[in-house]
Image (spheres, rainbow, N blue to C red):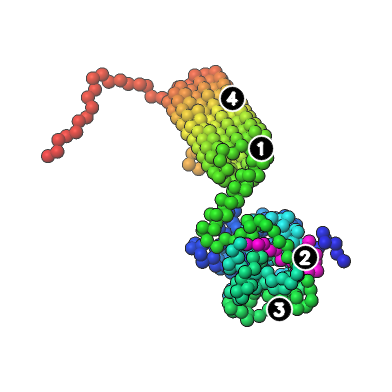
Amino acid sequence: MTPLSQLPIDVVVMAAGKGTRMKSRLPKVLQRLAGVPLVQHVLNTAAQLNARSAVVITGHGADQVEPLLLAPGQAMAVQCVRQEPQLGTGHAVQQAVPALADDGVVVVLSGDVPLTQADTLQALIEQCGGKQLALLTIDFADPTGYGRIVREGTQVQAIVEHKDATEAQRQIQEVYSGIMAVPAHLLKGWLGRIDNQNAQGEYYLTDVVKLAVADGLPVVAHKIADPLQVAGINSPVQLAELERAHQLRQAQRLMEQGVRLKDPARFDLRGQLDCAQDVEIDVNCIFEGQVSLGEGVKIGANCVIANCTIEAGAVIHPFTHIDGEKLGVTVGEGALIGPFARLRPGAQLGAEVHIGNFVEVKNSTLAKGAKANHLAYLGDATVGERVNYGAGSITANYDGANKHRTVIEADVHIGSNCVLVAPVTIGAGGTVGGGSTITKSTEPGALSVARGKQVSIANWARPKKQPKA
């Protein structure tokens, strides 16, 4: 017999439903939880099982769903099959049969149930053992709408859908989650025998239970107590409720690791957040993509931070927006950023850099101690140590066709309201007088002023409005 750890696992994801109650043109499985499409959550979990493949059953909105599933970057092989028309869950899985090998264990998941954990599924697979049908179940105080687990002793005898259940069966609180693990060769045989003789006139996947019992094969249940792992999404209300529950769980995990959150109910993580010791995060902050916070970092209220590394001791003041996208952003040790600052892709800030209110930095390197404290733009620039960059100054990096780089060497002082027209180099220790437009490189230590001569006209009278006729 093949050891359980070596049994191939193939995942089948049901994602063909219309999701009418979502009241959206976007298919239900593409609605986002924590910034990620529901079906992508499911595939990410499947990848943690080291599954051999995933077969996703699409239908409504397939032209929108399939490009996401088949895009490069998936952690596992994905194949899409269509269910048209939709004739029930059993009919859906029948469409996947040609894509399934006979030698594996099939794990059936739902594309609108995003928070099932990999260790739960691993336990379910172990219950299956490559030789029997295993169901994931849970007890609900109000099981209305769910298929009931009918047992004789410890063995499952049937799953009875709510509309087909008797009054006595409706009192059963143990319900089927929609998730099962089953040997592929057995599943294929049972799918060929199910019928639609029920209240809905549909082919129920749950009928494989009674077929297994009829064949004398055991049906076991792995019961869990965590409702979030089996929660499905059918409406915007349910999506919002699950979002908040998920975010609170993420917040609690971070606090258990030592992160100080001012209010865990006002925290959103839509990616991966790694925190060193003594990190503090104020309210209404959103973290996206890959974010790393060094020891003692402080994040002020109402910040949006994505795809960046913030090193030890840095302070991000309120209302700052950082998004590194593909290039990333680095904020050095002890840097002060914001409030109301914007760091764009390619911003690389050294230690003790100051970026103040309404300053934007894009694709620029600022060395240790450089400062741009007010109302400024640095794009495609290399800024040396201890540079002071004045309020209202910009690097004019775009000529209408190409981007050019500005180099500001160490200890330069740029006055207020200056325009540095790239490509240009401001020599070390130089000064640019306020209001200057610099189009040529300057020598080290030079004072450079490029502006019109001031003219004052004494006793000048302002124009007056002419009386209306």
Q: How far apart are marks 2 and 1 (CA)?
A: 38 Å
Task: For marks 4 and 2, give the one nearer the viewer.
Answer: 2
Q: Residues within 10 Å of mark 4 (few under 14, many from 20)?
A: many
Residue identifier under label 4: 369
Mark 2 vs 3, N-terminal side: 2
What residue is shown at x 65% (from left), y 44% (from top)?
Answer: 253
Q: How far apart are marks 2 and 3 (CA)?
A: 21 Å
- At numbered mark 3, what does the secondary structure look like: helix, strand or loop? loop
Front residue of 62/280: it is 280
Q: Where is residue 297 in the image (x, y as percent from the top left)?
A: 61, 33
Residue identifier under label 3: 192
Mark 1 vs 3, N-terminal side: 3
Q: Are marks 2 and 1 in contact (CB under 8 Å)?
A: no
Residue identifier under label 2: 128
Q: Do the residues labelled 4 and 2 touch (CB within 8 Å)?
A: no
Vertical placement of residue 392 versus 77, above or below? above
Q: Quadrant of the N terminus?
A: bottom right
Residue sitting at the far right: 1
